[in-house]
Image: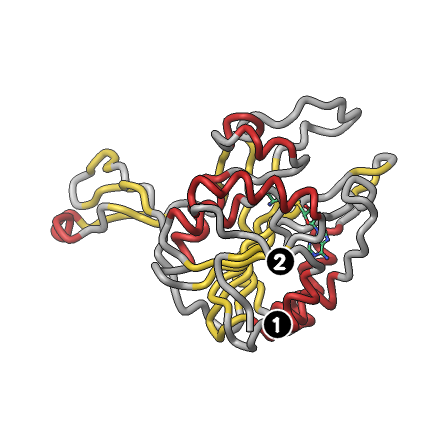
Amino acid sequence: MVKLETIYTENCLNTFRRTPDDFIDMTITSPPYDDLREYNGYHFPVEEIAAGLFAKTKPGGVVIWVVGDRTVNGDETLSSFKHAFAFKEAGFRVHDTMIYAKNNPIPSDCGKRYRQCFEYMFCFSKGAPKTFNPMTQAIKQEKAFKSFRITKVGRNDLAHDHIAPKERKVNNIFFYNVGTSSSRDKIAFQHPAIFPEQLVEDQIRTWTNEGDVVYDCFMGSGTTAKVASLLGRRWFGSEISAEYVKIAEQRIAAYLGGQAAA
Ligand SMILES: C[S@@+](CC[C@H](N)C(=O)[O-])C[C@H]1O[C@@H](n2cnc3c(N)ncnc32)[C@H](O)[C@@H]1O
């Protein structure tokens, strides 16, 4: 049986073996796409991982899969799309393809391309999502005409203005700072590819409630563990590199009283 509030120093495929079926409410993770050398060449069998996650996710649970593509000799790898097809093949629905847009992308020479500034945040769900706590924003009241008002969500009959919605769900493109402003924990930056804490917070709040179980199969520097813990969710994770588990343990010790590795 899997122990919660624990990072397993192992291939996530081994962690699946200790995890009961229909156990996880939500997985949030960023896989080691197109970066095999930087991660010491660990094998990355996406089909097996998608099938494992499908078995271990509760009906109505979701996987948030944050992934981008490399451009090699002017040609995009399309790893993100390959992963999406693998998850569909494993039985998941592609519930939403959200965009993680970077306010401050790392400057690079993109040749005859525009500056690359986003990654995908796929929401794969096992059936219809059982939890959805959407982020909302106020609807700006625009100019009123004789009998109607135009708003960002359409046309309101003025006679019914008092019952018109005052807020709406936010769009599915989310903007985040990357680099040093994405976490206050200096130690996290010893890992080469952390995702922003705010991104993890927004997604965990949206798809889970307090007490739900959140998993990260590629825990890296421990961002998911930290945020899940601060939000009152139970969590566990896998990280194949002992070096990165050490970083994650040190990072989250302050939030957990030191109980994090197995
Ligand atoms: C993109 S990083 C994740 C970073 C993490 N989101 C964070 O904020 O620190 C991917 C991680 O997956 C780990 N990894 C690669 N293959 C793995 C596997 N099969 N099982 C578990 N971890 C793996 C790598 O060592 C790397 O730390």
- Residue 47 is left or right of residue 231, and the answer is right
Looking at the image, residue 249 sits to the left or right of residue 198; the answer is right
Mark 2–mark 1 CB contact (< 8 Å): yes
**Dividing the picture into quarters, in which one does residue 211 lie?**
bottom left
Does 255 appear above or below 56?
above
Give the labeled residue for mark 1: 18
Q: Which residue is mark 2?
A: 8
Q: Label 2 vs label 1: CA separation?
A: 10 Å
For the residue pair 134 and 177, the one nearer the viewer reads as 177
State the residue at coordinates (40%, 57%).
233
Residue plotted at (69% across, 71% down):
89
Query: Residue type at mark 1?
Result: Arg
- Helix, strand or loop under label 2: strand
- Residue ID at (12%, 51%): 159
SS category of the residue bearing label 1: helix
Using the rendered image of the protein, determine whether residue 33 is visible from the camera's viewpoint. yes
Q: Quadrant of the N terminus?
A: bottom right
Q: Residues within 10 Å of mark 1 (few under 14, many from 20)?
A: few
Q: State the image coordinates of residue 172 (x, y, percent, origin top left).
A: 47, 47
Q: Nearer the viewer, residue 193 or 254?
A: 254
